[in-house]
Amino acid sequence: MFLRRSADEGLTWSERVLCTPQEGFFVVNNDRVTRLSSGRILIPAACHRAGEKRGPVQRDGTGPKNGEDFFFDSRSEAVFFYSDDDGNTWQAAEGKCCIPVMRNCSTGLQEPGVMELSPGVLWGYARTDLGRQYEMFSMDNGNTWTGAGPSRFTAPNSPLSMKRGPEGSVYAVWNPVPEYNGREKKTEIFTGGRTPLVLAVSRDNGQTFTKEAAFETEEDHGYCYCAIHFLEDGLLLAYNGGGPEDKSCLSRIKIRRIPWEELEKL
């Protein structure tokens, strides 16, 4: 990942700054980069092992020549990069997270996210194929992390999004698990069980959440990768919402505004 800045509404941009200063295949979701109360900027990333199986092509022509000679491990670890000087320089946190036993898991901890519970105390989460989002915690601004374990959020292999609102409540958007262990409904396109898309609110700093409210429910569509933005008069959500006419659940973007008075009913 790289960072560029603009001070003139995007007309011109600064030189790029490398934010992931180590070798690896890193996946960072939309709306995941977080600025902590300390001023630290934190990037949660999924790190996948990837590369050439037999090294580079040699002068005599031996060595890998096509995609079959490239490997990619779908089982990722959650790693973290941070900047303490407003994004001018970056380094990798010493701690990382992985699922203790990956024998029956083909995802590891994918597409991680982070939310700050209190100054220096972070709540991390990541999607898995084990029927739940897995969670982990840091007590030192993301330098080191606890082991990962199953959270309260059931889900297919689809990301959870969480963000704290201006009034202090925590908003969570995700796909709960009405379908699991191969019971996904047959549809014309891949949806990954990413329906319904639901919203829940915590008013006690993540200790408990309201009953989830579904706002997207079409069974032949997939809803995922939600970005959360707060307005003066409500909540703005942007997410994938494709269906059969789009040929993919990732081929359509939807934007939904929910007024604060509706959220207060949860």
Image: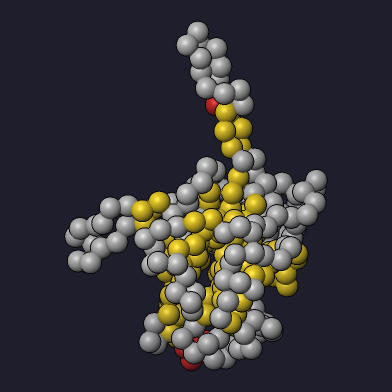
The location of residue 130, given as percent across then percent down, is 75, 57
The location of residue 50, given as percent across then percent down, is 59, 37
Q: How many marks?
A: 0
* Residue 83 horizontal side relative to residue 177, left or right: left
* Residue 177 horizontal side relative to residue 14, left or right: right
Residue visible at 49% across and 83% down? 165
* Residue 15 horizontal side relative to residue 253, left or right: left
The location of residue 201, given as percent across then percent down, is 60, 83
Residue visible at 58% across and 67% down? 142
Color scheme of the displayed model? secondary structure
Depth check, front residue: 17 or 126? 17
Residue visible at 57% across and 23% down? 55
The location of residue 127, given as percent across then percent down, is 65, 59
Residue visible at 47% across and 70% down? 40
**Quadrant including the C terminus:** bottom right
Depth check, front residue: 261 or 31? 31
Depth check, front residue: 204 or 179? 204
* Residue 33 horizontal side relative to residue 80, left or right: left
Q: Relative to 200, does residue 174 appear above or below in the rendering? A: above
Q: Is residue 31 visible?
A: no
Residue reaching furthest to the top: 60
Q: Is residue 57 visible?
A: yes
Give the quadrant of residue 220: bottom right
